[in-house]
Image (spheres, rainbow, N blue to C red):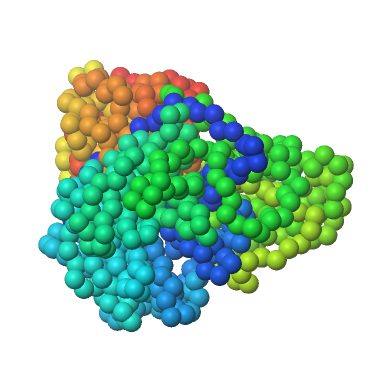
Amino acid sequence: MKLYFKNQLGLMAAAIMLVCCFTQTNAQVVSSGAVNGKKLNPLLPGYFADPTIKKFGDTYYIYATTDNIMLASGAPTVWYSKDFENWYNYKMDVPAFTAESLVNFWAPDIIQRNNKYYLYFGNCEMGCNIYGYVSDTPVGPWRKLNAHDKPVISHNYPREGFPSLDAQFFTDTDNRVYGYWGTWVHYNGGYAVGELITPGMDSMQKAKNIPLVQTPKPFEAPYMIKKGNKYILMYSGGSCHDETYNVRYSYASTPYGPFKEGANNPVLSTNADKTVHGPGHHSVLQDGDDYYIVYHKHDYPMTRGGLSRQVCIDKLVFENDSTIKAVVPANTGYINPSKVKPPQNIALNATATASSAYHLKMPGTDYEYAAALATDGNNATLWKAGNNTLPQSLTIDLGSVKRIRRVFTQFEFPSFYYQYVLRYSADGKTWKLFADRASNRMPGSPMIDDNDVKTRYIKLTVTGTEKQGLYAAVWNMKVYDKLFDIPLPIKNKNSVSAPALRSGHNILLDINAADMPAGKPFASVKNKGTFGGLMYKTGNVTIEKDETGVTAFRFTKGALSALKPVPQTLAWNGAYTVAAWVKAPVVAKEGSCLMSWCNRNVMRLANSYNAMYFNSGGYGAAGHLDYHFDMKYNHVPAANEWHYLVLTFDGMTERIYVDGVEDNAQMMTLSSAINGAKFIIGASDEGENYNGYMASLKMYDYALSSSDIKKQLQLTKPMK
């Protein structure tokens, strides 16, 4: 589906730049726990990308794009750790522009200088620019460097049309600070380099483009390091849409070049078994004499669109000052640079059971989010409940009665709150309260709960979530028999958002042309679903009998629309089903929207828009504002025949059924923008009219199963 940004060309460009996606790959085996004493990649429990890693004092910090939320547009957060194993997530206070909160916090970087910390990141709310902030601490609170939201690096700098994103800053041995930026540079004339004006740290000078020939096969994400007297410009090449994404480098004798391609390129790429898929957009940590490359890769199983990325780390080795050895990435293989010994997790690899577990079955993928994945100490795996209804529970068996002082719970989305209760039991029958977070509104990872009990079993019961449709899902639960210091004395603020509503398992819309007299004019149609009300006609919609005698709505550049707003149960990641009996005289190549229920004018970012279509193009079945996320029909239904088309989303997987048979499926996370939206049948919120017959349409606020769909196929078949 097309990106509908109209005059927001900068935002459109950013959307294209930041969408890293690929086709579903074959199933892979993900091992758990530590292997040969080495800790497992990914490094962080969550979906984060474009990482910048720094060490300030004795604490490590990772600043990253928050992924898996509206085109990687999650909240600005920072991760910090002293032991490099237990990472803590903090939602930073970064003043917004025109909105209540930042819409984009892309590819952040940070500089420590003169006892101040300077934070820079890309944002495309007012053109694609790099903005700067300053604080007295590495975690904020942050103040704007420039008044009137003036960028540090503006769009069209250093030349017209150049997108200012993916900026990284490098402080030379003479204390000068240089910036390197650019994305889609193979279309935009090469990376840009300039000098940051100090002491203000708020603007650039002497900027120019680096000729493309000096950085072969570039894409985005430049990163400068210095080794001896050589300036090594690392960058991401290939295509972020697939496994060709990689890290390359060139080197020079000055910060401005000229640069010469390095040996061993690419130095980081997808490994042979594809357990590390599409690695790139990195930073480098120098800790003593050792170097580490910190980068993101795609998650597994793969979320459609490739924006559920995870942060990994591997050793970076130099042959000499201008030559980097190729990195061999793995899910089992980083060396912890910290000398701080982490506390012992006594629940590691403990037996775990759950109320349910999601079993993902699609072509090429057969994967269970089993309870045991919550105790394997692996940030690549998580337990996820079988559906997004609540409550759901996870129980850990420690094997014997032990003293418990602290429990860490790492939920799937650190920047949203979860409501839960922890209970304990010595025998698995009689349960007592360990911690009551049933009214919690504080996000974070890990959630930390302290007590002092002797027990064998710990049970987590998730009772609520901040966002609609989120699953009870946990990367890791860690249990400790001792208390220990947390690196920073900070806590996340409570969210002002109320907990998400629960689905009523309702038929929201139930429209049937057979209830209306054929051939007579009408202004509205009664909705028999629980949403109630009337669907009002706009444009040309008639009630006719087709040539086979079936009574149907005949859409010819018309629509049926509700006046009431779409209910909150369909917000964000809420589950749904749309089921319609349709016959199109001609199958359109694009457009032809059967139903829409989101508002493109609220948030024009991929996955914030959902609509059902009937066309032969890339968004033939479902549109989400970007073809990387849209879903087509694998077998386009034939023209001029009646078909039962059903689109379902269970909060995890989107599926399209044609005449009772699943035709396509993809794993998704949505962030549906329903504010101000209305139900529209026969068109989208921007036209895209369906021209053809529709005998009936139903919309549910939950996902029908395949067996349910087969039953409804028989029960709702239009009568002649």
Q: Is residue 324 above or below residue 637?
A: below
Is residue 594 among what the camera can see? no
Instruction: Give the total number of marks visible in the rendering.
Output: 0
Quadrant of the snapshot with the C terminus = top left
Q: Which quadrant holds residue 382?
A: top right
Look at 34% across and 73% down and name the residue there: 174
- Expressed as whole percent of the image width and height from the top left, the position of residue 31 reads 59, 33
Q: Nearer the viewer, residue 541 or 283?
A: 283
Look at 55% across and 33% down and name the residue there: 30
Is residue 248 among what the camera can see? yes
- Expressed as whole percent of the image width and height from the top left, the position of residue 366 reads 51, 26
Q: Nearer the viewer, residue 323 or 245?
A: 323
Quadrant of the snapshot with the N terminus = top left
Report the residue that reaches farthest toward the left: 160
- Expressed as whole percent of the image width and height from the top left, the position of residue 402 reads 85, 49
Q: Which quadrant holds residue 22?
A: top left
Look at 35% across and 32% down and name the residue there: 23
Look at 21% across and 73% down and name the residue there: 205
Q: Nearer the viewer, residue 209 or 166?
A: 209
Q: Is residue 291 left or right of residue 192?
A: right
- Expressed as whole percent of the image width and height from the top left, the position of residue 265 reads 32, 40
